[in-house]
Image (cartoon, grey):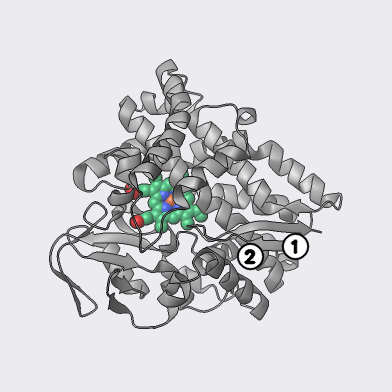
Amino acid sequence: MTDLAQRWEDRVMRAAHPIAFPALLASSRPVQRVPGLGVLVRDAALLRDVLMDSEHFTKNGPGAPSDLWTPVLGPSVLLNMEGADHLALRRRLAPLFSPAYVGALVEASLATSMAALTRRLSAGERVDVVAEAKRNASAMISQLVGLRAEAVDDSLFRRVSSITRVVRLSRPRLTARQAAEARAVLAELTAHARDAYRAGDESTVPGRMRALDLGEREAMGAVGAFVLTGTETLVSYVPRLIALLSDSGWMPRLAADRAGVEPAIAEGLRVTTPSPVMLRSATADASIGGVRVRAGERVILATFAANRALGGFDPEANPAASLKQLWFGAGSHYCLGAPLAMAQVRATLDAVLDAGGAAVVDRAPARGVLIPSYERLVVAR
Ligand code: HEM
């Protein structure tokens, strides 16, 4: 990665996590116990081993994501489940992420705004890619909850991110008040989803869930999980990818030859790792890379550190190819929304490249957020 691209990525990470980011990179030991936090894993192969071993490491024990999400979303929303129930729910939701369904969803929610993006850039306008990504995320939420896109605005995105903004590694639980506020935001969203579910209109995602035989509670939980996991990650990644391409000089290369688009997207996901850390709880005594882990201990999988260890953004050498998409996780909890995320990223990058590419003219990293992102990233041709 050029110095410029690396410098900006570091600034984005540090603006979000001024203490945790430098602390997690301070040592290069593959596994280490950090008093008060848990066992920290920084090595890609060991990290994958933990993700694949759901017998010893789960998402629903002490210190795991269930502590955070169960009070908000209820007990059965994939990201706090394990075992047979988890697998059964994933199987039932799988048709929603088939290439045909995802293609139609992206087309319905984004086609008009993508064409407008190309037109505005081609006309020489300055465009804030973060505002675009937020609007697109809101349009996608509206599809997921069965609302018309026009009914959803940026304030919806702000309310969703107000839920995650308060989460920190050292404070991985919401207070009772925060959990109540988060439930209120989600209740507002799922009220629409419930109507769409009950109407059984298969042109909406909740209606389709009903046709897939999901009970109403399961369907509403899934909607909440999609909204929480799928919006900020994309609002983080799309602008960071555009910035990386501009800062590294790759944008004009891709505009001239699209063959490099897929490795560029993968490399961008590797060096940014929008979901920078995953958490697990040890259910029994175990060992990770020779370090003993006791039952009940928290395991912090520092995916971003493992991914960064392979060097800077380089779509030509494409070291990302060796990681089997670790940035989307691995094993039973592998990102269910990955096909939707990839379709949205490709659509936005294509829209920018159709205008001949764009360069960053102004930007500001977002401060104090859970998912490192830009607050503003203004680009122009
Ligand atoms: C660039 C964008 C995205 C990234 C980097 C990302 C990353 C991840 C990662 C790392 C996990 C696994 C977490 C773990 O094992 O602890 C995950 C799970 C998940 N993601 Fe994504 N995600 C993205 C976009 C989306 C979107 C758009 C959706 C939308 C619908 C989504 C839905 C989910 C769900 C439902 C899970 C939980 C799966 C389970 O526990 O079985 N994600 N994601």
Instruction: Using the image, tell me which numbered label, if any, was put on residue 374.
Output: none
Q: Residue 136, image x and y in percent?
A: 62, 42
Of 38 and 150, nearer the camera is: 38
Q: Is residue 61 above or below residue 215?
A: below
Q: Residue furthest front?
A: 177
Up the image or down, 81 lies above or below 28; here it is above
125 vs 105, left or right, is right
Disc number for residue 362 = 1
Q: Count of labels shown?
A: 2
Residue 4 location in percent, x, y? 67, 76
Q: 29 or 2, which is in the foreground?
A: 29
Q: Judge from the rendering whether residue 65 lies leftward or rightward of residue 5; answer left or right.
A: left
Spatial CA span between label 2 and label 1:
26 Å
Q: In the displayed structure, does residue 238 sit left or right of residue 222?
A: right
Residue drawn at (38%, 38%) of the image: 180
Q: Position of residue 370 (x, y in %)?
A: 47, 57
Callout 1: 10 Å neighbours few (<14), some, many (20+)?
A: few
Instruction: Report the amino acid beneath label 2.
Output: Gly
Badge 1 amino acid: Asp
Circle 2 is placed at which residue position? 260
Q: Is residue 239 left or right of residue 185?
A: right
